[in-house]
Image (cartoon, helix red, strand yellow):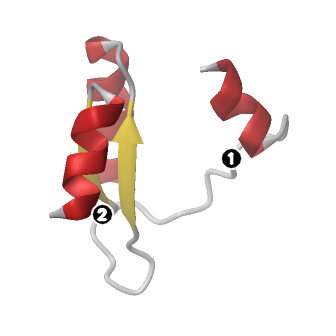
Amino acid sequence: MEATNKSLGSSPVPDDTKSGDSSADSKTVLLVEDDAALNRAVSFKLKQKGHRVLSALRAEDALEMLQS
């Protein structure tokens, strides 16, 4: 998690996206988090914000998703 925080910087992510599915604002997010509970929670929140979420618990699984 430390590397992720460094790459994103210290500023928080703005919470100004609309809730629900809006195709104009929707993005696909590849979520890689090995803590299953945290993975589910973040995935749920991103989906609430209208994003499509590809979720993986391991980096190897995420790479397979990208290649398919």
Q: Position of 10 compared to 57: left or right?
A: right
Crowd around label 1: few <14 · some 14–19 · many ≥20 (10 Å): few
Residue 9 vs 25, above or below: the answer is above
Q: Which quadrant holds the C terminus? A: bottom left
Crowd around label 2: few <14 · some 14–19 · many ≥20 (10 Å): few
Taking the image as drawn, is residue 14 in sight?
yes
Q: Nearer the viewer, residue 27 or 30?
A: 30
Residue with the mark numbered 2: 20
Q: Position of 47 compared to 13: left or right?
A: left
Picture quadrant of residue 36? top left
Residue type for callout 1: Val
Q: Residue at x 46, y 66 (%)?
A: 18
Taking the image as drawn, is residue 44 in sight?
no
Q: How many marks?
A: 2
| Earlier-in-chain disc, 1 versus 2 | 1
- Element under label 1? loop
Q: Residue at x 45, y 78 (%)?
A: 25
Q: Which quadrant holds the N terminus? A: top right
Q: Nearer the viewer, residue 25 or 27?
A: 27
Residue with the mark numbered 1: 13
- Element under label 2? loop
Q: For marks 1 and 2, give the one nearer the viewer.
A: 1
Residue 34 vs 59, above or below: the answer is above
Most extreme residue toward the left is 68
Q: What whole-number distance in Å separates the C-alpha atoms at marks 1 and 2?
A: 18 Å
